[in-house]
Image (spheres, helix red, strand yellow):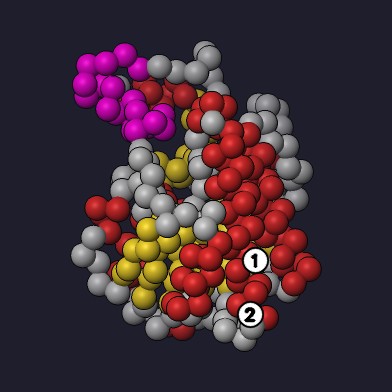
Amino acid sequence: MTKKQLDNKKFFVTGGAGFIGSEFIIQILEKYKTKVLNLDKISPQSSPIFLEGLKNYKLVQGDLIDSELVKSSLSSFQPDFIIHFAAESHVDRSISSPRDFVDSNIIGTFNLLDSLRALIDEGILSEEIRLLNVSTDEVYGSLSLKDKPFTENSQYDPSSVYSASKVSSDMLVNSFLRTYGLRCQTTHCSNNYGPRQFPEKLIPFSLYSFLSNLPVSIYGDGTNIRDWIFVKDHVLCLIAIMENDFIPGHFNIGSSQEMSNNEIVESIK
């Protein structure tokens, strides 16, 4: 597939009112002649206002837990691509409300995959439809300073309910690829930052706190090191994957911009 061939394709996006999903929708509509249907339950972390008024964009407010809504939305829209962003994503909330993460990240992903499988079997959707599952590098666990960076061959080693639920989601996607032949791909990205990010995350939280003359909290001693990628660059990588011919499997996305939490907060200060 070439860049020009993305024109006139239709994109079914889950969780498109979220931080990364909204950036994807804005970019894909700017770059290509296309249509986007966004299925989003609109949580407190969503920012649907930034997508209002976009041409060739439609929001369907609903939850992936509603399997009938998922199937009917896919059937009526007839997409060429499914981009799966929808997920509960904050480690702290996964500790206090683990069931929300199981429902959204595991059951929701299953409903999406099973609806896709059924609609292909019924001849309603083409076998050529592609699904891109946007996951996280947290499925790999943590590294020490002497460890080599993660690769696509690294073993999963989740350490929270959040990362465990994303591992489960990823394995469901892989099983539908291998068992039913669905054209699925998964990406694992490092920590994103940028516009429209909900202020529970380190960078926007620190920005808000400093601007409001409030104290900034840092986990532990602040020496944890993370790789940081600007959300616009992450989305460019996602689009590049779709611009190319389908290759099954999963892909790691990062920027090699590693900083400790202390360094991040000091830079913002």
Q: Specify which label sits upstream in the sequence, 2 or 1.
A: 1
Height in image: 186 above or below 75?
above
Q: Position of residue 101 (x, y in %)?
A: 57, 40
Say which amino acid is labelled 2.
Ile
Element at badge 1?
Answer: helix
Locate residue 69 relative to residue 48 in the image: left or right. Answer: right
SS type, badge 2: helix
The residue beneath circle 1 is: 114
- The answer to whether any part of residue 104 appears in the image is yes
Residue at 42 percent of width and 61 percent of height:
39
Which image quarter: residue 216? top left
Which residue is painted at 56% across and 62% down in the image?
67
At label 1, the amino acid type is Asp
Q: Mark 2 sits on what residue?
A: 120
- How far is mark 2 from mark 1, CA to CA? 10 Å
- Residue at image position (57%, 27%) is 95
Task: Tell me if residue 19 is in the magenta stretch.
Answer: no
Q: Which residues are magenta?
A: 199-216
Callout 1 crowding tier (Cα within 10 Å): few <14, some 14–19, many ≥20: some
Count of numbered marks: 2
Residue 134 visible in image: no
**Which of 258/35 is in front?**
35
